[in-house]
Amino acid sequence: MSTSNGMTSIARKFFMALSGFFLIIFLLQHCTINMMSVFSSEMFNSVSHFMGTNPLVQFALQPVLAFGVFFHLGMGIYLEIQNNSARSIKYAMNKPSENASWMSRNMIITGIMVMLFLGLHFYDFWLPELNIKFIQGDMTGLNDTGNFRYYEELQHKFHDPIRTGLYVLAFVFLSLHLMHGFQSAFQSVGFRSNRWSPVIQKLGNLYAIAVPLGFIVIAVYHYINA
Amino acid sequence: MDLTLKIWRQKNKDAKGALKSYDIKGVSPDSSFLEMMDLLNNNLIEKGENPVAFDHDCREGICGSCSMYINGEAHGPDRLVTTCQLHMRKFKDGETIHIEPWRAKAFPVIKDLVVDRSAFDRVMNAGGFVSVNTSGNTQDANATPIAKDAADKAFDAATCIGCGACVATCKNASAMLFVSAKVSQLALLPQGQVEAQRRAIHMVEQMDHEGFGNCSNTGACEVECPKGISLENIARMNREFLSATITSES
Ligand code: HEM
Ligand code: SF4
Ligand code: FES
């Protein structure tokens, strides 16, 4: 089992945690920038233009992000398959909720929900971006009227109540994923202390509520305002 | 107390098993779970049926052999106890009790409720020891000073009885709690330092090789462990293993 992909179980979880940490940092940044759209369309437009055209962001950070997402996803599925096969005959009577939280036992479910959302999200924003910038070769970030297009595109997407609803639902799953994931990642890299682990637990709950809630507020705000 | 028992019966390791229902009457609420099983087996023998095979030895919570998955939990509904320490007063008169063997690919069923836990022995053989000089010139144990908190933590880790409840409980059948207790009890002491890196690497490799699952940090093992072995040990083993992988010479 250990060498099927050349990694031990602990190494696999170490990299799972590293990719998780990376995604946590990325999402904080993403949420902060999106939040600007609620306060000032100009600020949102200019930061979006910077992020969308800066070569460092586009050609260094973005590939790392893409790799991080696919690695986390692939490894998550791999771990799930392996874990399932470690118990081929299941219990006739089992009470898993007696000793572990729903979140910790269903990371694959909440994770796959986030993955399905990512599909929609890429279709909504990422593919059009790639199309405009790299296929049509338009790096100006301007629309027909000569203004930045980002804010307008954002508003346009959240016109649709179903899409807004799907976004909100996905963030609920993300929140559940992080309720367990945030502190679990520290354990996976071996960090645990009587002094800091309770702080990490609280910080994790704060992050798992604040960041998804932030995204929900943004989506609902633009739905109402559109 | 009168009870209905649904017990996993399986002739041998290759046979296909099934849950079988038994009625049992007149169980004392003060008896232990294993005494209740003895009563059942007496009844079965009197009727000329095959008694239920289950592992047991010390009957005082120190050998770890009494593996039973009772009503959906390892060692039953009570906390910090083995099956032999579980009292029948934890159940209600007229209750139906499910009794199953530990379920893990690495712990194949041998007969009824008895499973083969030799995978744990092989993990121990891979490095769960300290090599000592047995030539007769053994050093006095007190010659090596050990900090009180390190000694306490090593002792706590050493209370693991190798019962396998952690594996049985874990949704991934992961053995991380057991292996981490065994790595920790030595890693915390100066005597264990010499072989620390090798130990962590070899024991983890053997653990994976036996087909235990990965750790999802659900913490179920810690809750069900009869000795209250802490998840702190798993974090320590992660540290030991990861740093050994980076720095090991071998
Ligand atoms: C793309 C969809 C995703 C899938 C399929 C997925 C799947 C998983 C799975 C199965 C685990 C548990 C692994 C285990 O303990 O055995 C996990 C852990 C984790 N995930 Fe995700 N996830 C996804 C997205 C995300 C996102 C967007 C974030 C962060 C914002 C994230 C952060 C984490 C963290 C921090 C952990 C804990 C790592 C650990 O236990 O060491 N995941 N993920
Ligand atoms: S860690 Fe606890 S549950 Fe696991 S084998 Fe040791 S005593 Fe049993
Ligand atoms: S019989 Fe020894 S611990 Fe239960």
Image: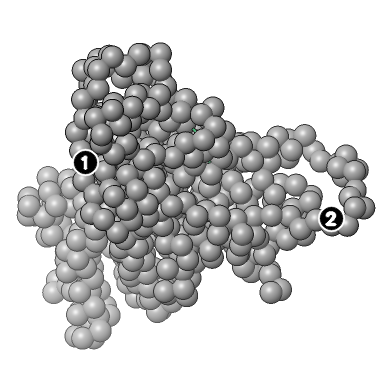
Is A7 left, or right, of A112 in this rendering?
right
Name the residue rendered at 21%, 46% in the picture: B18
Q: Disc 1 and disc 2: Cα gap in Å?
A: 50 Å
Q: Count neighbours of disc 1 (C-alpha within 10 A) and say few if under 14, some if 14 to 19, many if 20 or more.
A: some
Nearest the eye: A219 or B240: B240
Name the residue rendered at 88%, 39% in the picture: B142
Queried on whether the Cβ of the residue with tag 2 lies below 8 angstroms from ligand 2, the answer reads: no
Please identify the quarter of the rendering in which residue A91 is found.
top left
Rendered view: B44 above or below A78 = above
Name the residue rendered at 33%, 66% in the picture: A78
Q: Count neighbours of disc 2 (C-alpha within 10 A) and say few if under 14, some if 14 to 19, many if 20 or more.
A: few
Q: Could you tell me which secondary element the residue under label 2 belongs to? A: loop
Q: Which residue is mark 1?
A: B19
Q: Chain of mark 2?
A: B
Q: Is residue B243 visible?
A: no
Nearest the eye: B229 or A154: B229
Q: What is the three-letter code of the residue carrying label 1? A: Leu
Q: How many marks?
A: 2
Q: Chain of mark 1?
A: B
Q: Could you tell me which secondary element the residue under label 1 belongs to? A: strand
Tell me, yes or no, whether dots 1 and 2 are on the same chain: yes
Q: Which residue is mark 2?
A: B134
- Measuring from the top left, give residue A151's x and y in whole percent: 21, 60
- Measuring from the top left, give residue B129's x and y in whole percent: 69, 54
Queried on whether the Cβ of the residue with tag 1 lies below 8 angstroms from ligand 3, the answer reads: no
